[in-house]
Amino acid sequence: MDATEIVGMLAIGFCAGMLGGLVGVGGGVLFVPGLVIFVGLSQLEAESTSLLAIVFVAALGAWRQSRYGNLRVRDGLLIGVLSPLGVLAGTALANAVTERTLELAFAAVQLFFAWSLARRALRPRDEGSDTTPAPSAANG
């Protein structure tokens, strides 16, 4: 691993962490494509490496958001309770399909969520909807 790859990985980590804290994304959205495009990892290697990196982002992000009162522990636990089984199934499947299939599946998931979120954000708001910023330590 040369200095360029190290700097690239540090930049990917910082950007993914920043976006993770800002909008709740990081691993799948930035780690994977960044590792594939800028570092040259295969899709499978990038996805596997991302799983480890997500641990740190998720733990720190959840802790910090809990300090602002934004963490819904019960919801997080309900979502997370079957995640280990899903990871076991997903990693077995990822190792059974071709690299091209993984790339296309990853891109499809990204496009679906991007389209869904953009559509939701562009939807007209009700007059009574809350448009105030999220609470922060400074104002709430």
Image: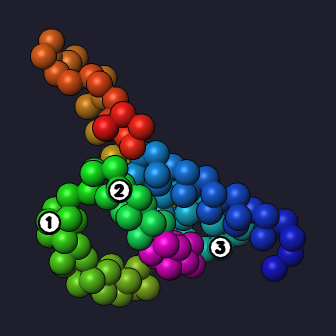
Give the spatial CA distance, label 1 vs label 2. Answer: 16 Å
Principal secondary structure, stretch drawn in magenta: helix
Give the spatial CA distance, label 3 vs label 1. Answer: 36 Å
Which residue carries the number 3 mark? 41
Secondary structure under badge 3?
Answer: loop
Report the mark closest to the observer, 1 or 2. 2
* Outermost residue toward the right in this view: 3
Q: Please state the horizontal and vertical placement of residue 140, each as a whole percent of the image.
A: 31, 38
Q: Relative to 74, say whether 68 is above or below.
A: above
Residue in the image at 49% along x and 72% along y: 56
Question: Mark 3 belongs to which amino acid?
Answer: Leu
Q: Please state the horizontal and vertical placement of residue 31, each as a whole percent of the image.
A: 55, 63
Which residue carries the number 2 mark? 67
Report the mark closest to the observer, 3 or 2. 2
Q: Residues within 10 Å of mark 1 (few under 14, many from 20)?
A: few
Query: Can residue 80 be found in the magenta stretch?
Result: no
Q: How crowded is mark 3: few (under 14 residues within 10 Å), some or many (20 or more)?
A: some
Residue in the image at 78% along x and 70% along y: 6
Residue in the image at 39% along x and 43% along y: 137
In the foreground, 32 or 108:
32
In the foreground, 108 or 21:
21
Q: What stretch is highlighted in magenta?
A: 45-56
Which residue carries the number 1 mark? 74
Q: Relative to 68, say whether 9 is above or below.
A: below
Colouring: rainbow
Question: Mark 2 belongs to which amino acid?
Answer: Arg
In the foreground, 88 or 83:
83
Name which of mark 3 and mark 2 comes first in the sequence: 3
Name which of mark 3 and mark 1 comes first in the sequence: 3
